[in-house]
Image: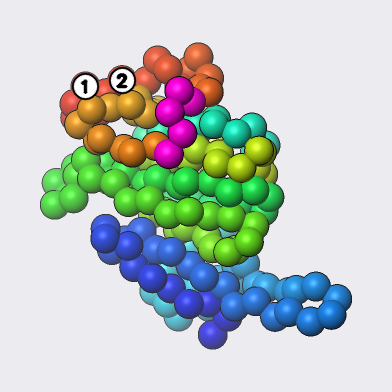
Amino acid sequence: MPFNIERMEIHDVILIKPKTFNDNRGYFLETYSFPQFSKLNIDFKVIQENQSYSKKGVIRGLHYQKEPYAQAKLVRAVKGEIYDVAVDIRKGSPTFGKYVSAYLSEENKHMLYIPRGFAHGFQVLSEDAIVIYLVDNDYAPNYEAGIRYDDKDLNINWPIKNPILSEKDLKWPYLKEIR
């Protein structure tokens, strides 16, 4: 199996640790395999790949798409380091409004699988970072939504205070406003 997995505190979110093969040339690792993910009971078929570049302190998120365009994501940092966050926004979930987080970096090569029904965001901890997201549904701008990064009910402990955010991310509602 080319992956080791660790179920997060919210068990549907999975930290994936690819096995890395190093030699004098560098390294090789498998980052996605539908058959291997299926064996791990991760039902994830890639529809689109996205990439972002961000500077230190930037927070992107907390984003999600509404049904029928909700997206599961597989997130990894190919350059730099990020603090990655997934917030459970599934109606009726026993962990609704709770979040899990992981440090993803080019060094540890870890990936975070975030199923549909979660808001997602990350903060860049290194001087800059390139993040790749594989998603299982099309991007639909009319179904895009988000939650404020500084929502007191979520109480996310972002590592860098005074973050850099887009105007759009500053205007998202609080979780209690979208229930």
Provide residue 167's location: percent of width, then percent of height.
50, 14
Q: Would you say residue 157 sits in the magenta stretch?
A: no
Residue 99 appears left or right of 34: left
Instruction: Name the amino acid type tagged 1.
Output: Glu
Query: Helix, strand or loop at disc 1?
Result: helix
Query: Helix, strand or loop at disc 2?
Result: loop
Q: Give residue 90's quadrant in the image.
A: top left
Is residue 69 shown to the viewer in this render?
A: no
Q: Nearer the viewer, residue 11 or 27?
A: 27
Instruction: Name the amino acid type tagged 2.
Output: Pro
Q: Quadrant of the C terminus?
A: top left
Q: Which residues are magenta?
A: 159-163
Provide residue 2's location: percent of width, then percent of height.
58, 80
Spatial distance from mark 2 to mark 1, Cα to Cα? 6 Å
Q: Nearer the viewer, residue 168 or 69?
A: 168
Provide residue 139's location: percent of width, then percent of height.
54, 37
Q: Nearer the viewer, residue 107 or 45?
A: 107
Magenta region, main secondary structure: loop
Colour style of the rendered protein structure: rainbow
As drawn, 57 above or below 34? above
**Image disc number at residue 177:** 1
Q: Quadrant of the N terminus?
A: bottom right
Outermost right residue: 25
Residue at left offset 48%, top offset 62%: 44
Q: Give residue 76's quadrant in the image.
A: bottom right
Q: Give residue 107's quadrant in the image.
A: bottom right
Q: Nearer the viewer, residue 51 or 139?
A: 51
**Image disc number at residue 173:** 2
